[in-house]
Image: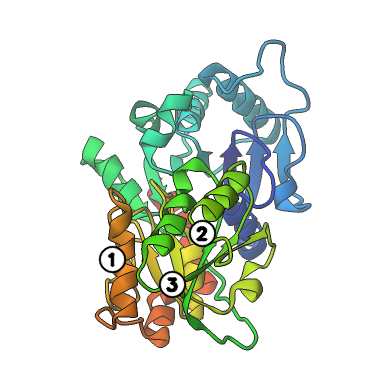
Amino acid sequence: MITVDVVMPTGGSAGGGVETILYEWSRNIPDDEIRLRFFHISPGQADYLKGYKDQWTLPMPEEGMDKLTLEYCAKAYAFFVQQQGAPDICLATWIPLVSMACRAVRDSLELSFPVISFIHSVISAYEPYGLGGMKELSAADGHICISKIIENEILSADPNAFTLNLGNPINPVEINEYAPDDRTICFAGRLAPEKNVDYIIQAIAKAKDKNWKLLIAGKGVFMESLKQLSKELGVEDRVTFLGWLEKPWESMKKARFCALASDYEGCNGTTREASSIGMTVISTPVGGVVDYIVPGVNGYLYSKDKVENLTTILDGISDGILPICDTDACKKSVEPYHTDKYFANLKNIFKSLVAND
């Protein structure tokens, strides 16, 4: 039996990127081989785990320990290890600060388990919020990466770092009566600044073909401003806001394309799910997407410095210059990320980490 501590800063809620992946871990890793102990550094039950038995949180924060400081994280994890025993592997999750905290606990208690980082965004995204950077991340003995962009960022800072590019798992999407409309695009995700959904709206407004339509599944603080933008650009009849949907693909099954305009991503799962349906992905070159998109085969990549870059792709498709990608090729491109293959790979990683410790 291999015991793996998954150390998270907070309990989190269902629907987040990290939380979704860890929930899949709790469901797909056999507990007769590998015991996952989810430890959260803040009080409160972790809703995203949906009742998973081996989850732990602090009973109450100590006085003054109300922020995710290095000292706070280290004291919390030290308390857990002293109460529950040392793991075989410690997975320092979500933010770089946790890697340094877990390393400090291991060293201070004179234990020997490996500390492995598992972050879900580019490192530069954490630093402005005081959540750590490469300095804190380098305290880990190794890094499980969810995209080549994150892996390359680590290796650029430390060419000798031990990294493994795992990606994220997907369950291939099965929908009824898939009847694509070759001028309908979909977007699924948070309506947050870094997602730049306004860019996609502007692109369909500028496109020569006025039959382009956009389906938006998601919620966020920018929803009302996006609706207002659609009206100002005269495309409100071609942009549909579906709100947050637990199963968005049934409501977007007419879309032939999935678009992304993000500034950065850890490993975008939406595009891979769209590919598993057979949709052509049109995206900025962000984490996870560049790992598998081959322009002209299963999608297209564009730079977001000008709206015209996305508009040019839409016009090229309308004019027949750029082909709509073959649905079977799109589906095949994400087969390595299917749940069964992903978890077989993850189990082997855990076993190798223990064997090499």
Q: Amino acid at mark 1?
A: Thr
Q: Residue 156, image x and y in percent?
A: 22, 40
Mark-to-mark CA distance, 2 and 1: 20 Å
Q: Residue at x 46, y 72 (%)?
A: 212
The image quadrant of residue 63 is top right
Q: Secondary structure at mark 3?
A: loop
Residue 234 numbered mark, or none: 2
Q: Nearer the viewer, residue 262 or 14?
A: 262
Which comes sooner in the sequence, label 2 or label 1? Answer: 2
The answer to whether residue 3 is seen in the rendering is: no
The image quadrant of residue 312 is bottom left
Which comes sooner in the sequence, label 2 or label 3? Answer: 3
The answer to whether residue 68 is seen in the rendering is: yes
Q: Amino acid at mark 3?
A: Lys
Residue 44, placed above or below residue 177? above
Q: Residue at x 50, y 20 (%)?
A: 108
Q: Secondary structure at mark 2?
A: loop
Front disc: 2 or 1: 2
The image quadrant of residue 46 is top right
Residue 79, placed above or below residue 235? above
| Residues under numbered marks 1 and 3 in contact, where contact means CB atoms less than 8 Å apart | no
Which residue of the protein is positioned furthest toward the top in this rendering? 64
Q: How many marks?
A: 3
Q: Which residue is mark 1?
A: 312
**210 sits to left or right of 178:** left
Q: Residues within 10 Å of mark 2 (few under 14, many from 20)?
A: few
Mark-to-mark CA distance, 2 and 3: 11 Å
Q: Which residue is mark 3?
A: 210
Residue 155, placed above or below residue 347? above
Q: Residue 124, image x and y in percent?
A: 36, 34
Q: Residue 110, image x and y in percent?
A: 49, 25
